[in-house]
Image (spheres, rainbow, N blue to C red):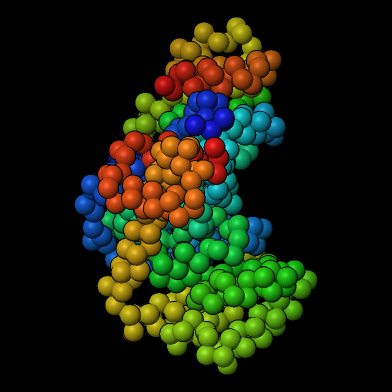
Amino acid sequence: MTETSEAAVLRGKRILIAKPGLDGHDVGAKVIALALRDAGAEVIYTGLRKTPDYIARIAVDEDVDAVGLSVLSGSHRDLVKQTRASLEAIEAGDIPIFLGGTIPAEDWPDLYALGVQRIYTSEMPLADVIASIAETLK
Amino acid sequence: MTAVTGKQRRSMARALSRAADASVAEVLASARGSMGVCRWIGVTGPPGAGKSSLIAALARHRLGRDGNIAILAVDPTSPVSGGAILGDRIRMEDLAHNPRVYIRSLASRTSHDGLADNLPDILEIVENAGFAEAILETVGVGQVEYAVRHVVDTTLLVLMPGAGDQIQAMKSGILETADIFVVNKADQPGARQLAVVLASVLKLKASDGQGTGDGWLPPIVSTSVQDPASVAALAEAIDRHQAWLAGRQDVGKRLEKRRAQHVESLVVRRVAEVLDQLPVELLHAPLASLYEAVVGRLTESAPSSGVAREPKERTILSR
């Protein structure tokens, strides 16, 4: 065994990190992408300002195990709803959605009801985020 | 078939994952065959040469004529974590909206030749899905990437201005194996000079009778993705090469090359598996005994049926 293999909790997983909507900040998305890679995942990053249809299409073509949406614009509710609808429209509603960004706690119940698997904010330690994703995708 | 629709896309995407994940034992147990007729274009070259953007421009041009196109882009797997950032498709963004295009990112996994594990199986799935043409982008990290020519029909080497030193370094590597040389970013300073240096190196090789050794004289095409005429010229050079191929080489020969590459990649992976399972004490034995032990294990034991991604970097070197 290598010394690193225990850290590779996401080995064998493919994850799409996507930036829907209009906010132009992707530092958080990139930090998460690198952390996922370091945990052994194969990460596809979409770049900024992608439409929900586009994200859903890539999720299918790349056969990912999960879609991570990074939203800092405040329109997380609409973007989650639309992305979920776009996935369902191409019969990929089973692909889990993670949400990260500035997401006020009072919105969480609605977002879970819309089908978000887990919500992560910038205050959470990166290691906890990775562990939580790995646990969910087990 | 022109467009690949919803359900088909997902089942193809999943089939590609299964093929990519297959262990050596699983590959050997599966009986696959290609029924499709698909022209493969391989694109290699150093990082930053603009391979992904050029592929997007080329695909856009060729879609005007052909029904559909598949693009496979390989990015490197981290030898430490086994993870990867697959970012080539960011440069192909507008293409991904087109239902006649399928883009798939692949991680190199245990392959060190610029390709990805189980690539021949992956290519066959694309062929059987009915794509008329497909483009394969290699990792693009070094001059060892001539493996690509064994799995595609036409190999492009993409270089950029300022790459004169790279040519010096590549002289005896991929320069001998590319079918078409592309001076990309031709709108930047130094592009002409690069084309001149390339031409002189190639001329030298031609006069030595080295060429690609089969009578094809590789053209040098200067391209800029902002200049549609230059992309059209590249597309035309590819057509010329494929017409030339059709005139002299049957499909059987390509399949032979691909099979040889396939079995080689499986043996290399199997060796890594054997090394991984070797008792540490053996590593202190004389080299000849160690060699005997490895070869012995290769022939007597069956490939393990574990998941392909597991043993990855757990070779002798990482102990």
Query: Which residue is at a point 61% across and 30% down the rendered structure image?
Result: A35
Query: Which residue is at a point 44% across and 79% down the rendered structure image?
Result: B241
Query: Which residue is at a point 67% across and 70% down the rendered structure image?
Result: B169
In the orientation shown, which residue stands out farthest toward the bottom? B207
Vertical position of residue B134 compared to residue A7: above or below: below
The spot of residue A62 in percent (x, y) is: 44, 41
Count of number-bearing discs: 0
The spot of residue A80 in percent (x, y) is: 51, 23
Vertical position of residue B234 compared to residue B278: above or below: below
Name the quadrant of the N terminus of chain B: bottom left
Where is residue A78, by image quadrant? top right
Q: Can residue B66 be seen in this view?
A: no
Q: Looking at this view, is B298 or A107 the one in front?
A: B298
Name the quadrant of the C terminus of chain B: top right
The spot of residue B305 in percent (x, y) is: 30, 38
Relative to residue B75, is residue B277 drawn left or right? left
Q: Looking at this view, is B39 or B206 the one in front?
A: B206
